[in-house]
Image (spheres, grey):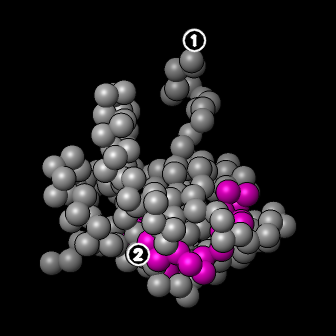
């Protein structure tokens, strides 16, 4: 049985209405006024709900030129699906340094999912596949090892990287940095 990751945060962190989502994304992206550039091969953008970060995230995604990209480094979305690159996933698993995340845990995690509607919109009509990689806190000793394992993908100009990051959190659930 094929496992499909559902858009578990659609309807709460962003709209699950395909028409409204399409309009929001198009509006935010066009409002940036950014020119598309084939030199853009990666972004770092927030993964908060779109009511908080939708407009800001558009500045990360707004200048992506999808023409020469074939692989995104997710899945079912309200505005279209993004297929997973099973070949690369098997390559990474074969190193013994990557493992598959349980589907329920993956759907509870929101950091990658918040980038997916933007990526689906930007790469609409382009044959791309996704390689989702979730990285938590790495020990410094492992950084170089993972760098070596992923270097060939970074060197390949047909790969695009979408890095989801929160630079800070606000609110009572989070402990402020001292």
Give residue 3's position: percent from left, percent from top.
23, 72
Q: How many marks?
A: 2
Residue wearing tag 1 = 178
Q: Residue at x 80, y 66 (%)?
A: 34
Marks 2/1: CA–CA distance: 41 Å
* Picture quadrant of residue 84: bottom left
Q: Residue at x 52, y 75 (%)?
A: 69
Query: Do the residues under discs 2 and 1 have CB atoms within 8 angstroms?
Result: no
Residue wearing tag 2 = 129
Give residue 45's position: percent from left, percent from top.
61, 51
74 drawn magenta: yes
Magenta: main secondary structure: loop
Q: Earlier in the sequence, mark 2 or mark 1?
A: 2
Q: Quadrant of the N terminus?
A: bottom left
**Which of label 2 and label 1 is nearer to you?**
2
Dot 1 alpha-carbon crowd within 10 angstroms: few under 14, some 14 to 19, many 20 or more: few
């Amino acid at each position: 049985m094929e496992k499909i990751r559902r858009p578990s945060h659609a309807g709460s962190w962003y709209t699950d209405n395909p028409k409204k989502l399409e309009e929001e994304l198009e509006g935010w992206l066009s409002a940036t006024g950014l020119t598309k550039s084939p030199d853009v091969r990666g972004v770092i953008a927030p993964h908060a709900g779109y009511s908080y970060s939708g407009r800001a995230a558009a500045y990360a995604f707004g200048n992506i030129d999808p023409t020469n990209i074939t692989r995104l480094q997710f899945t079912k979305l309200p505005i279209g699906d993004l297929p997973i690159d099973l070949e690369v996933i098997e390559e990474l698993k074969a190193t013994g340094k990557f493992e598959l995340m349980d589907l329920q845990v993956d759907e509870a995690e929101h950091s990658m999912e918040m980038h997916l509607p933007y990526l689906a919109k930007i790469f609409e009509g382009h044959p791309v596949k996704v390689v989702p990689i979730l990285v938590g806190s790495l020990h410094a000793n492992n950084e170089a090892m993972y760098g070596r394992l992923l270097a060939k993908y970074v060197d390949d100009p047909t790969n695009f990287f979408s890095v989801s990051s929160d630079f800070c959190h606000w609110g009572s659930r989070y402990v402020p940095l001292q």
